Image: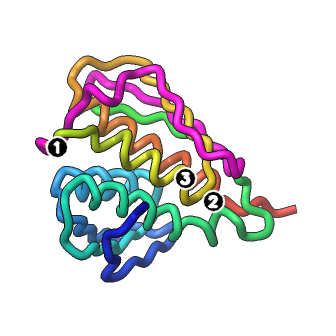
Amino acid sequence: MYAVGVAGTTLVARSAAASSVDTGVAALDRLIELAARAGRFQVHLALAPAEPEAEVDAAGAELGRSLLPLLSVAGARGHGVGTMATDEALATVVLEVSGRPLVVANVDLASSHVGGLESDLAVRFLNALATVAGLTIHVRLVEGEESAHVVDAIFKALGVALADACTVIQD
């Protein structure tokens, strides 16, 4: 299903270091870097060149694979919430490691074309991430008109929610 070759991926939690993302889709690179910065992840992701839609799927899948060890470590919270804004847009992402991959949104992400892609970048990425990491992801748009701001807010909220889910709870 996700056939694009991965040249290399690393993910470090609780890091303020800069990320380096090269998926071949500049708009997606920027969104993943926004999510990483908001969630305090350091992400190094490089994909071998392919068609843009395949690269979006592969990036979501690879990020999901990289998150699995952090989400499944003993004591990891396993669920998270993030609310972030970009200009007039305010979005909340709630997620859970459920083993039942699903993305639910109250906003039509399919109409938010980003980076000139024919298909929707956000939907493809989130579905691939949810499938590989076994996540149920709920996206709620509280406010927002400009589609670029909406997608930015969603990805930033996703980063915060993922960081929350990866947090190890000490007894």
Which residue position holds label 1? 117
Which mark is on residue 131? Answer: 3
Count of numbered circles in the view: 3
Q: Residue furthest left?
A: 116
Quarter location, residue 76:
bottom right
Q: Characterize the local packing of mark 1: few (<14), some (14-19) or many (20 or more) Cα atoms within 10 angstroms.
A: some
- 159 relative to 144, above or below: below
Q: Nearer the viewer, residue 19 or 23?
A: 23
Q: Are marks 1 and 2 in contact (CB under 8 Å)?
A: no
Whether residue 118 can be seen here: yes
Q: Secondary structure at mark 1?
A: loop
Q: CA distance from mark 1 to mark 2?
A: 31 Å
Per the rendered image, the range of residues in magenta is 88-116
Which residue position holds label 2? 166
Query: Does label 3 or label 2 sit earlier along the sequence?
Result: 3
Q: Are marks 3 and 1 in contact (CB under 8 Å)?
A: no
Query: Does label 3 or label 1 sit earlier along the sequence?
Result: 1
Q: Viewer-nearest of labels 3 and 2?
A: 3
Point out residue 158 in the picture as x, y percentages from the top left corner.
Answer: 47, 45
Q: Secondary structure at mark 3?
A: helix
Q: Could you tell whether 125 is left or right of 11 in the image?
A: left
